[in-house]
Amino acid sequence: MVIPKMAQMVRCRIGYFTLKCSNRVVPRVFLPLKYQRLCFHTSWLLNVRGKEVLMPSLSPTMEAGTIVKWLKKEGEKIEPGDAIADIQTDKAVITMEYDDEGILAKIIIQEGAKDIKVGQLIALTVEPDEDWKSVELPSSTSIPSAASVSVSSESTESATPPPGQQNLAMPALSPTMTSGTIVKWLKKEGDEIEPGDAIADIQTDKAVMTFEIDDEGVLAKIISSEGSQVEVGQLIAIIVEKGMDWKNIVLPTTTAPVKSSAPAPSVSKPAATAAPAGLKPPSSGQVYGLAVKRLLEEYGLSSGQIKGTGRVNRLLKSDVLSYIQTNNVQKVKLEAVSPKTTKADAASRISAAAGKPSSYEDIPVSNIRAVIAKRLGESKSTIPHSYSTIDVKLDKLIDIRKKLKVENIKVSVNDFITKAVAHALLECPDINTLYQNGQIIRIPRVDISIAVATPTGLITPIVFDTVSKSLPEISETIKELAYKAKEGKLKPQEFQGGTFTISNLGMFGIKEFSAIINPPQTAILAVGSGREELDSSISPITRMTVTLSYDRRAISEDMAADFLAVLRAMLEEPTFLAVKRARNFMNQVE
C-alpha cells in the first residue's frame, strides 16, 4: 500500500500504525501479511531487509569452507575492499574481501563452523544510513544444523559466559580435523596472554600445530589436560579479561573434561529396559557423534530406543544420559559383549596367571596415521588405479651432479627428478589434473607434493610453482619442508593442495614399488633406487625404475606413456635442468 506524500515505502510487522506527515495525521491502516514481503524501508521504525553475504568459492576445487575468524564485528562499517573474514578452504586459509560499502549487521555463521557450503548465507549487511540493529533475518535462510557444524554436543550447549569471560573451544586447525590431542599447554593458569601468544601445542590429523590467541587476557582455567583427545568445538579452557579475578569464574554446567566418564546411575538395581547384548533394537537412523556412540556401546543401548531432541534428527549426549538415569540402565560388562574368548585373551590370561609379562603390546594409533589409513583405504576402494613402469639411465645425471658439487652446488638425485617431473607435467598437462565431482580439473600451475616420512606418519609438503624454481632452490625448499614436517611445524598452507605427488624410496634401497594416489590428485610417481647393471654392449650403467600410478577415470594409458617418455628423456639428458646455475661448465657435458 502506498501512502501519498511519503518519502518511502514501509512494511509493518504489527499491522496497525500511525504516522505524522507534515501537518497531517495518517490514520492507522492494516497491511496484510502477504504484502509485507513486497515492501522495504530504510527507517529505524521498522525492520531492515539486509543484503545477503554468501560463502564464496575461494579456490577452483572448493565446495565448502570453515569460518576461521571474523575480522569485522556486528555494527562495524565496511569499506570497499575491506577484509571481513578468514576462511579455510580445501587449500589454505584465505581472506574474504567485501566489494561494497555498508555495515556488518548480522553474523549468521559463527567462528569455527565447518563444512559451510559454497553459496550458503553467512552474514547480512545493510546500507551505511540504515539501522543495522533492526536487520531482519530472511525467512528462507538455511542455518547449518548441528550435524553440519563440527561442534561437540556435550560442550556447545553451555550457557553464555558472563561479561569478561571467554570460553575457549578446540579450534579446527585443518580442513579435515574433527578432533585434536592437546600435546602441551604453553601457558599456566593465571598467566597473562598477549595478542599473538601461543597457548598450546595441538596434534591434528596432519601435524602438531601451535594454537595462538588474538586477544589479550588471563588464562583462568584449563578444562582439558595434556594428552586429552578433544573434539573440535569442545571447551578446553576459559580466559578472562585482565584485571578480573581469574580464580572467580563461572564453569559451564554441561561441559566436562574429555576423559571424564559418564555419570553412574544413582540406583544400582538392574534395568528392565536395557537391551541384552547382541539383541539391541534396530537403529533409528538418527545422527549422533562419537561421545553418544561410546555411551550407547557402554550401556548396551541402540539409538532406536531413545528419541533425540537435537535439530535434524540428531541424538544428543544429554538425551542418552537422561534415558540412562530415568531407566536406571547399568553398564554392560565386557565379558557379556564378546561372544567367545579369543586366543589372544586366553594367552594373556595364562601369562598373567603364570606371573609372566604379556606377549603383545598395544600401540596407540596417532591421529595422522588414523587419517592416512582412512584416506588410503578410500583411495584404493574408490579410484581405479592403473600402473605404468619405465627404466631410466642416470649416468649423465650423476655426471652433472658431480660437476655441480665441484662448483659447491649440492643437489640430490631427487631434486633432479622433482625438476624433471615439473617440466614433464608442463609438457603433458593431462597428468597435472584433479578429479572432483565427476569432473577433470586441469590446473595451470605445477605444485608438486613430496612425500616425507615422520615419526607420526606420512605427510606431503608442497613445492609450489616448481617449474619456476632452479635446482638449488628446489633442494633448499625440500630440505626446509622435510625438517618442518619431522618437527611437526608445517603450516596448513604448506601441505594442503598440490597437483602431483612424488614418493621416493630409493634412499632406502627399494628397487621398485607402486604408490597409492592422493585424491583429488590423479597421479603419483614412485621412485626406486639407482642400481648398476650391464647394457647390451656389456658396459656398466646406472638404471632407475619409476612407476606412475594414475586414475584411469582421468588419465588413459597413452597419456601415461607420453608423460613417462618425456620424463625419461629429461632425466637421461638433464643438461637444461641445471642450466640456470651451471652455465660455465654445461658445454663440457657433451
Image (tube, helix red, strand yellow):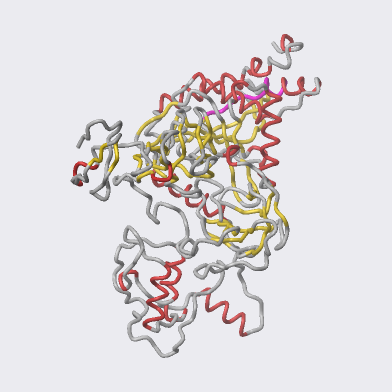
Q: Is residue 16 left or right of residue 377?
A: left
Q: Quadrant of residue 421?
A: top right
Give whichever of 61, 325 is nearer the camera: 325
**Is residue 463 visible in this depiction of the protein?**
yes
Identified at 52% across, 49% down, the residue is 372
- In reply to whether residue 393 is colored magenta, the answer given is yes
Span colored in magenta: 390-399
Give whichever of 315, 135 is nearer the camera: 135
Q: Quadrant of residue 471?
A: top right
Identified at 49% across, 75% down, the residue is 262
Give whichever of 358, 537 is nearer the camera: 358
Q: Residue furthest top?
A: 587
Residue 147 position in % (x across, y down): 39, 55
- In reply to whether residue 394 is colored magenta, the answer given is yes
Q: How many marks?
A: 0
Residue 153 position in % (x across, y down): 45, 62
Identified at 36% across, 32% down, the residue is 439
Does residue 431 sit above or below 147 in this rendering? above
Q: Quadrant of the N terminus?
A: top left
Give whichever of 239, 222 is nearer the camera: 239
Does residue 483 sit above or below 567 in this rendering? below
**Is residue 380 visible in this depiction of the protein?**
no
Does residue 103 sit above or below 559 in this rendering? below
Identified at 40% across, 47% down, the residue is 381
Q: Quadrant of the C terminus?
A: top right
Residue 216 position in % (x across, y down): 67, 50
Q: Is residue 291 left or right of residue 466?
A: left
